[in-house]
Amino acid sequence: MSNTQTVREGIDFSETRRWSNRHQTVSQQLSGIFDIYNIDNDDKLSAYNAATENFKWLIGEAKSKGIRLHALGGGWSLTDVGMSRDYLVNTKQLRLIFSISKDRVVASYPGKAKGLRLIQCGNSITRLNRKLRESKRSIKTSGSSNGQTIAGALSTGTHGSAFKFGAIQEFVVGIHLVVGTSRHVWLERKSYPVTKPNFAKILGAELIRDDQLFNAALVSFGSFGFIHSVMIETDPLFLLEAHRVLLPFNNSFRKCLSTLDFSSLNLPHPHNNDNQLIHFEVVFNPNGDLKDAIVTVMYKRTFRKNYPHLEAETDEPGLGDGALSIIGRILDQLPARLTRPSINRSVASEFAEYGPKWGTVGEIFSSEKVRGKTLSAAMAIPLSEAENALEIALSTHSNHGELFPGIISLRYVKGSEATLAFTRFPQSKRIAVLEVDSIYSKENLNFLKKVWKQLDQSNIPYKVHWGKINNITKSRVNKMYGNNAIEQWTTARESLLEPATRNIFTNPFLEKAGLAT
């Protein structure tokens, strides 16, 4: 950045002509970046409310000058979902966290006030894990990477791998949205009220309880205005017992892929005697012989202080590392000339068996390393189609005719209620997520396109992750979600933002998806 100037207390401006995301897959010309931060104040609530006023001011400036804005979080998305035609608003310095007193919570709320937290939008998942641990609390689930901000992870539908709980958005129960120069709202579900009206009042916000509006705003790509904060439900601090094992890729295993019936699998703990299994992930090396599947399982356990702590190594794989980190490390190990044996050795090294190993959510899912330009795509499909989708990906690889330095995997998650969550399939409570991960190149992108084509031709319903490499078009969004869901989402957006403000928060991605109204 250069020529940084303070344009208003709590807002700096920098002339920035080009911006790239963390994974180097998208880049854009910009007019500049606004950095918004909390004004130093002993009163945290006053500082928070001052930031609300600054969000409103930015909308006013954009409206008067006819420019577009988009909130910038961790820059973690691999697509242009977080881009803007004109200006980005860097929110990463907005990192306040509030506990909620009992007198702010409705009597009908089924949980406890001590488990609620108001999280300002710029908090990274890394920082959130650390701050929650200080009060012996934990987020309920996590994506495999933790470099995103809470608002960014929420807004693109980060799914994680908790097949009994769901994605990031499932633990969000309130959203503070700044939607105009004189309007900001506190949004909850009508079917699940959490706070008394006095809570919205201390924020100066308009209280809205509406299920359709809330579900639409959960996954909204930064196009519903500025998400200033979210209220989340947390769990008491717990441990994860993690194992990685190789299991024969036989008929019993294949059946499990589309049923999650673990009774015939030789898991570390017999499933009929242990119902605390919450994470099930299967990785395949398509360049190998496919005799075995690489299986990672995690069990939820009561927290104890004397567990064997993981030693953080700056260059070692974390237990919960996702493909973005793993592919990067494999690239580091590979010679300049890629060969099938060298790829197989590297994958075997990265996915060696282990267990049991123990850690909190923040310790297990601890990777935020980025190495080079990676290709990562995720397609959510109904559980019953998981085996068929996997077979399509593997057979497409065998017919591809070119070396594919990557992995193909399945993760499982409980379906979401969010209107445009890519893990939303109303007819299926459990969702399988087929993932294809490799080096970003023209050849590997071509392989991914072949997988999408084969899924289409086989009539397997799927939805693509908004924040990963995808094939989004208006017609595809219509096919994936249907007119009813799209109408609910666009109607919700129109009810919150007047036309001029909708234009401010419209970017090329939204237009490409046919969601700009």
Image (tube, rainbow, N blue to C red):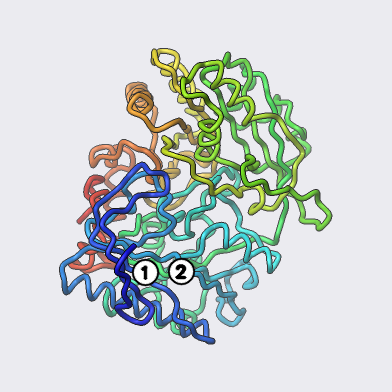
Mark toward the start of the polypeptide (2 vs 1): 1
Whether 51 is drawn above or below 345: the answer is: below
Element under disc 1: strand
Left or right: 456, with 374 as reference point: left
> Dividing the picture into quarters, in which one does residue 506 lie?
bottom left
- Where is residue 15 shown, x and y percent of the image? 27, 64
Viewer-side residue, 217 vs 31: 31
The residue at the point 51 percent across, 27 percent down is 407
Q: Which residue is mark 1?
A: 35
Tag 2: amino acid = Gln
- Left or right of 43: which side holds 135? right
Which numbered disc covers residue 466? none
For residue 90, above or below residue 320: below
Q: Please give the count of numbered marks on the rendered protein.
A: 2
**Image location of residue 27, percent across then percent down:** 30, 47
Please state the horizontal and vertical placement of residue 453, each as a whole percent of the image. Answer: 32, 24
**Left or right of residue 349, residue 406 in this image:** left
Q: Quadrant of the N terminus?
A: bottom left
Whether pointer 2 and pointer 1 mark residues with C-beta atoms closer than 8 Å, the reply is yes
Q: Secondary structure at mark 2?
A: strand
Mark 1: amino acid: Asp
Residue matched to label 2: 93
Which residue is painted at 73% across and 44% down in the image? 241
Judge by depth and name the residue closer to the eye, 98 or 35: 35
